[in-house]
Image (cartoon, helix red, strand yellow):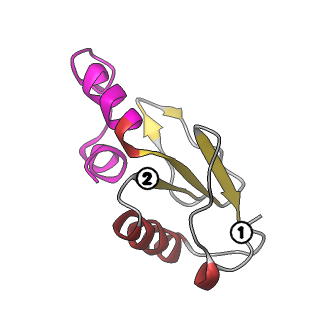
Amino acid sequence: MWEDAKSFEADEWDKQVHIYVFDDMMDPHTLSELACEYNNKYPEFLFLEEHPELVEDVDGFICNEGELILLIVQGRKHLEDAREVLKKTNYYDKWTPEMKERIIDR
């Protein structure tokens, strides 16, 4: 659980993905701003927001969890390397420009 956004500091993470769950109803705009703030503060990591109101629709398939408010943290280099491989395939072909901007172009 995400205890306090003001006192959050990066841990010595020992997993490839860390998922923080918010126990209160944070609006999607505030969550996106928080992700942006931490992406700037910790450039070696990528913080991705997940919110029920931020629907990720890929050709009619809803990709996000849909109920929980989450902040997903991954090592940036590993994720960006994987994205470069996927860009050489048709993986992103059905993504909307808005989804690409929000998810990929950070």
Residue picked out by circle 2: 45
Residue picked out by circle 1: 2
Mark 2, residues whose alpha carbon is within 10 Å: few (<14), some, or many (≥20)? some
11 is higher (above) or lower (below) than 17: below
User: Which x, y percent locates residue 68?
Assistant: 71, 56
84 is higher (above) or lower (below) than 74: above
Q: Which residues are magenta?
A: 78-106
Give the mark nearer the N terminus: 2 vs 1.
1
Q: Quadrant of the N terminus?
A: bottom right
Residue at screen point 58% across, 43% down: 64
Mark 1, residues whose alpha carbon is within 10 Å: few (<14), some, or many (≥20)? few
Position of 37 compared to 66: left or right?
Answer: left
Inspect the image, locate mark 2, and give the three-letter code of the amino acid beneath it.
Answer: Phe
Q: Nearer the viewer, residue 86 or 74?
A: 74
Inspect the image, locate mark 1, and give the three-letter code of the amino acid beneath it.
Answer: Trp
User: Which x, y percent locates residue 22?
Assistant: 71, 67
Magenta stretch secondary structure, dominant: helix
Q: Quadrant of the C terminus?
A: bottom left
Q: Nearer the viewer, residue 14 or 61?
A: 14
Quick one: SS at disc 1? Answer: loop
Q: CA distance from mark 2 to mark 1?
A: 17 Å
